[in-house]
Amino acid sequence: MGRKKLIVCNLTFDDNETIEEKILKMFSPENLINCFSEANYESYKKVIDHTNIQLILGDEELMSTIYSFFENSLNTSVTSAKTFMHRNTLNYRLDKVKKLTGLNMKLFEHAVVFKNLIIINDIIKSFNEEDDE
């Protein structure tokens, strides 16, 4: 018997690859960009273009806070200490995201959704930059 191979979005996975290797390969930004198609582009663009999403993505201070929060494993105490930000200020900013999107950044599942939203926004930007050239 030969080795089993799984093909997903032009990627080939061998049986001997670890799950970590498969995950890193499949969900790398490069692969997500390659798998992004015209069929799902418009659907994602409608969500990304929503005013509330654009308010958050366009706010550098808020996005910097969110990135720091992610880097510190969604821990408010560590994030506030490392960013020299009062904990109430951090909570206020996270509450702003919740108010505008309904996503509670303190919940892992919601943070993952927001992280994916950031990635999809970057992909859409790269598509738009290619169209401008």
Image (cartoon, rainbow, N blue to C red):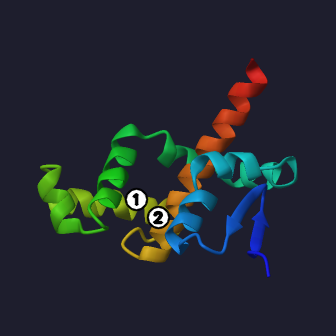
Quadrant (top left, top right, bottom left, bottom right) of the N terminus: bottom right
Inter-mark Cα distance, 2 to 1: 5 Å
Residue 57: give x, y in percent of width and height.
Answer: 50, 44
In front of the other: 44 or 22: 22
Quadrant (top left, top right, bottom left, bottom right) of the C terminus: top right
Residue 43 visible in the current orientation: yes
Residue at the right extreme?
39
Relative to 14, is 57 above or below? above
In front of the other: 50 or 16: 16
On residue 99, the disc is 2
- Under circle 2, the secondary element is helix
Please state which amino acid type lies under the numbered disc 1.
Answer: Lys
Residue 27: give x, y in percent of width and height.
Answer: 60, 59
- The residue located at (59%, 58%) in the rendering is 25
Relative to 65, is 61 above or below? above
On residue 96, the disc is 1
Do callouts 2 and 1 mark residues in contact (Cβ within 8 Å)? Answer: yes
- The residue located at (73%, 54%) in the rendering is 44
